[in-house]
Amino acid sequence: DQQVKQNSPSLSVQEGRISILNCDYTNSMFDYFLWYKKYPAEGPTFLISISSIKDKNEDGRFTVFLNKSAKHLSLHIVPSQPGDSAVYFCAAYYNNNDMRFGAGTRLTVKP
Amino acid sequence: DVKVTQSSRYLVKRTGEKVFLECVQDMDHENMFWYRQDPGLGLRLIYFSYDVKMKEKGDIPEGYSVSREKKERFSLILESASTNQTSMYLCASSSGLVINEQFFGPGTRLTVL
């Protein structure tokens, strides 16, 4: 039972445009959400997170939006750069329990 | 610079072999985790440990065991490897205070023939 879902396995955008990666979750107990970025042959690295008490968190070109009523979060990258090309994993977590990951979305940013 | 290292990047084993995957972190983290990554399934937690000699089952512990004799080292053991254990294995660690921001190793791609 996948509690965290990323329904788009891949996304392609032009350099300079906005990339929007989506994530849905089913467990309303989740209270902390993270995005990880993974390059080939490397482990995932933490990118940005958001607590359930917020609906937006921004860090430079990266913004995460949380819609608790819809159980949906999204990662916006503006402007997208070729170096952003990677697999992005959404993850959710609550109360010292293990973290649940989505299946990942492969982002390709074309020059 | 934080570091999580895994003993092998690529490993090929035969069905029925006992396999050891080693993970070492140099950040004095309390928590360590083993995941496997498969296409379309993302990262799934196999086992985790909150302290030395402690272990907890994750979502898919069947066919695996773990050992944490020292704080910096967390080993994943496949007692009798099977072809459905062919996967990318990722180790991670986190501080006891910031359990949710995990630092990952580069992964071990295991092929079981």
Image (cartoon, coloured by chain):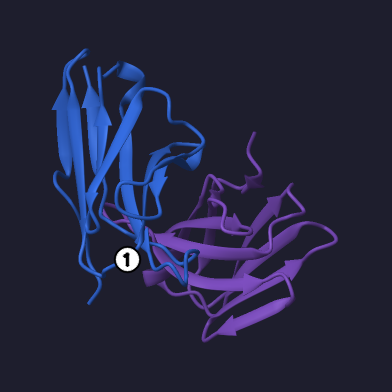
Chain colours: A purple, B blue
Estimate the x, y position of residue B79 in percent, counting from the top left.
Answer: 25, 21
* Residue reaching furthest to the right: A69
* Residue reaching furthest to the front: B53
Estimate the x, y position of residue B112 in percent, counting from the top left.
Answer: 23, 21
Using residue A9 as the reference point, say whether residue A83 is left or right of it: left
Q: How many marks?
A: 1
Estimate the x, y position of residue A49 in percent, counting from the top left.
Answer: 56, 72
Image point (38%, 39%), residue name: B36
Q: Is residue B17 above or below residue A99?
A: above
Using residue B43 as the reference point, say whether residue B13 is left or right of it: left
- In which quadrant is the N terminus of chain A drawn? top right
Of residue B24 and residue A81, the one placed in the foreground of this image is: B24
Image point (54%, 53%), residue name: A99
Q: Is residue B74 in view from this perspective?
A: no
- In which quadrant is the C terminus of chain A drawn? bottom left
Image point (63%, 59%), residue name: A95
Query: How many residues crowd mark 1 within 10 Å: few (<14), some (14–19), many (20+)?
Result: many
Q: Is residue B100 in view from this perspective?
A: yes
Q: Amino acid at mark 1?
A: His
Q: Chain of mark 1?
A: B
Q: Is residue A54 above or below residue B33?
A: below
Estimate the x, y position of residue A2 in percent, counting from the top left.
Answer: 63, 38
Q: Is residue B63 above or below residue A92?
A: above
Image point (60%, 57%), residue name: A93
Quarter of the rendering containing residue B34: top left
Residue under label 1, please give it. B29
Using residue A105 as the reference point, say whether residue B56 is left or right of it: left
Q: Secondary structure at mark 1?
A: loop
